[in-house]
Amino acid sequence: MTETTYREALRQALTDSMRRDPSIVILGEEVGKYGGAYGVTKGMLEEFGEARVRDTPISEEVIVGTAVGAAMTGLRPVAELMYVDFVTLAMDQLVNQAAKIRYMFGGQIGVPMVLRSQGGTGRSGAAQHSQSLEAWMMHTPGLHLAMPSTVTDAYHLLMHALTLHDPVVFLEHKGLYTMKGELKPERALPWGKAEVRRKGGDCTLVSYSRMVHFCLDAADSLSKEGIEAEVIDLRTLHPLDMDTVSESVSRTGKAMVVTEDCLTAGVSAEISARIMEEAFDFLEEPVLRLSGEDIPIPVSPELEKGSVPSVDRIISTAKMLMRR
């Protein structure tokens, strides 16, 4: 096991995959000489050359459209968008082309590409550089969606994404890049399997990406008050492992879904509905949702913090769920 950062684990996954598979190429704005907006591809141009690490024009539709075409003709492109907010400029290429081509071609051809981007709050990026748009991706049949919360998952989920035959949207949280942790090269759950990050018998907290860490901090504080919360990290939102969630809720009888994306029609709505459908007989209380506010993300650091769940809000909401 090696201690490294989330960013370096992503770079290692890309490097290891490209050394093994010469069909993998990287393209995006400033991914080459600059090393990527958040430094993930730094140094990769020097090792793999301009043919495999390509700087592109400032055009998201060109980046994603090129990746789709390249994937259909034998390459495995990794397209990087600086911010997930900019995926709106390439939605036709992503959701009408990449996601549907296998179906429209009767299974004869796929689109083995990975769309890497980052989202979330924490750097005062304001309304156009801080969104959490995973619900849009989750809503689209034909797209895989991974959102790792740990160094080990950043490495293993990206490595696996680069072996799939269909498009993967791989979303990283901007607040996790400098997070340090142990990279366990031989330890990874299967693709699409959620992980129980903390065991507990009183209530279940379901989350993914950065909010997993908020839930873990909240669970530690709740434990001091006699409430043992189980924390589940979904890891991927498509496929979505509801078996692990339902098994936990069937034991605890209480569930709370914590996400950073907007409340209305967000990921928490789908997960809470599925819990109600699949574990209703075991629920002692209605499922609670704690999500981002239905507002554009403010630029003010304090207002930005208030627009998404905090550890304190998770604690107070869990106490409400437990009627404490």
Image (spheres, rainbow, N blue to C red):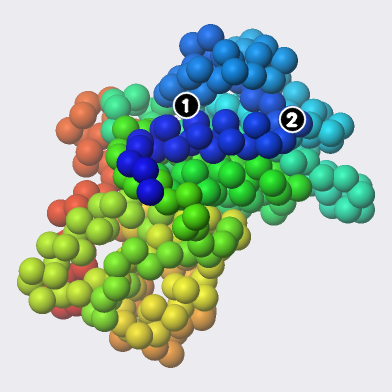
Picture coordinates of residue 273, whole percent (x, y):
48, 70
The residue tagged 1 is 40
Picture coordinates of residue 315, whole percent (x, y):
17, 61
> Which amino acid type is marked by label 1?
Val
Label 2: few (<14), some (14–19) or many (≥20) C-alpha neighbours in 10 Å:
few
Q: Is residue 251 above or below residue 117?
A: below
State the quadrant of the C terminus. bottom left
Q: Earlier in the sequence, mark 1 or mark 2?
A: 2
> Which amino acid type is marked by label 2?
Pro
The residue at the point 92 percent across, 49 percent down is 108
Label 1: few (<14), some (14–19) or many (≥20) C-alpha neighbours in 10 Å:
some
The residue at the point 30 percent across, 38 percent down is 179
Between marks 1 and 2 in the image, the one whose residue lies nearer the viewer: 2
Q: Which mark is residue 22?
A: 2
Q: Which mark is residue 64?
A: none
The residue at the point 21 percent across, 34 percent down is 303
> Can residue 285 be seen?
no
